[in-house]
Image (spheres, rainbow, N blue to C red):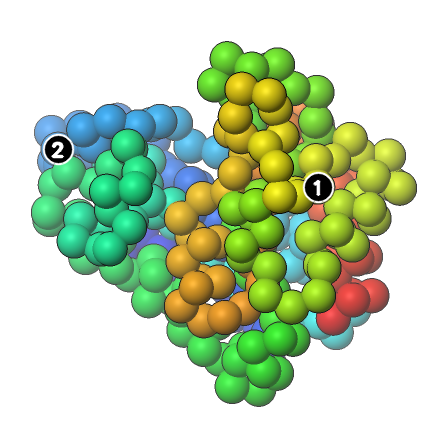
Amino acid sequence: MRDFVVSTKSDHPPKIVLSVPHDGLWTQNFTGHFTPRENGVGGSDRFVTPIANDILVYCQEKGLGVDMIRFLMPRRYIDANRPAPGMRDYAKYEETSFSDERLRVYYNAYFEELEASIDRAIATHGKQNILVLDLHGFVRGRREGQVTDFDVVLGTCHRKTIRYGEPDKSLGGHLSKAGFNTFTPGNADVLPGGDPFYGGFISEYVANEYEVNAIQIETEKRFRSQDGGLVGARLAQTIGDWLTATF
């Protein structure tokens, strides 16, 4: 680990890169050390990492190379799923990535590790043969005041982060067939009042900069609670089954 970034690398160049940007430590650990973000959600995506880790272990046991990059800096101080001040997409987002300039080094460290894994994957397998999965969590019925009943939401910025084939539709179909109520992205909003699951900065950034497929995966709270370990593990295995069969 360096600069609050935990990077788990496959023994051989990966085809899958997992991003877990909101796996933060307790905010109270840093009280008085840094200036919090001016605005934006401050909580972490609790228990997303066990799902990501289960996917990684399952795939590696099947011989599929997977890298996982986790960010431990509390989201109250840094949201890596938002562009840094000075980046061209900064004004596009209402929520800030960080407000304390001293935190830029940690923000950069996350992307350095993420991009190093993507570079390693592309060098061996080619752009069209890898997939970046950006893992997050949501709470049913609480996204921007709109009621939803999804278990899993796949965000692709209205399919702008899909460069080759239809992996989003394939994954969505696989999850749905396994019994998970899944929103599969299309070219329209998921809800009449707008699309709160549009997809975030990381998936859009890597798709644009590296010309690879990227999908943001949002998992509902019950799969991430301490009591939901078994259903979370089944979700991870279902995703792992699709990855090993597809890549």
The answer to which image quadrant residue 223 occupies is top right
Crowd rating for badge 2 (residues with CA inside 10 Å; few <14, some 14–19, many 20+): some
Residue at point 45%, 54% (across, down): 204
- Please name whichever residue, 114 or 153, is drawn nearer the observer in this view of the structure: 153
Among the two numbered marks 2 and 1 on one chain, the one whose residue lies closer to the N terminus? 2
- Horizontal placement of 146 versus 103: left or right? right
Residue at point 71%, 59% (across, down): 167
> What's the CA distance linking mark 2 and mark 1?
38 Å
Q: Secondary structure at mark 2?
A: loop
Amino acid identity at mark 2: Thr
Looking at the rendered image, the quarter that the C terminus falls into is bottom right
In the rendered image, residue 197, in percent from the top left (x then y), is placed at 54, 34
Q: Secondary structure at mark 1?
A: loop
Is residue 38 placed above or below 90 in the rendered structure? above
In the rendered image, residue 4, in percent from the top left (x then y), is placed at 31, 52
The residue at which mark 1 appears reads as 184
In the rendered image, residue 38, in percent from the top left (x then y), is placed at 18, 28
Residue at point 43%, 64% (across, down): 208
Looking at the rendered image, the quarter that the N terminus falls into is bottom left
- Horizontal placement of 113 versus 180: left or right? left
In the rendered image, residue 201, in percent from the top left (x then y), is placed at 40, 48
The residue at which mark 2 appears reads as 35
Badge number at residue 162: none
- Please name whichever residue, 42 or 198, is drawn nearer the observer in this view of the structure: 198
Is residue 8 placed above or below 146 in the rendered structure? below
Amino acid identity at mark 1: Thr
Residue 168 visible to an observer of this rendering: yes
Q: Nearer the viewer, mark 2 or mark 1?
A: 1
- Horizontal placement of 77 versus 197: left or right? left
Residue at point 40%, 68% (across, down): 209
- Please name whichever residue, 222 or 242, is drawn nearer the observer in this view of the structure: 242
Is residue 159 placed above or below 243 in the rendered structure? above
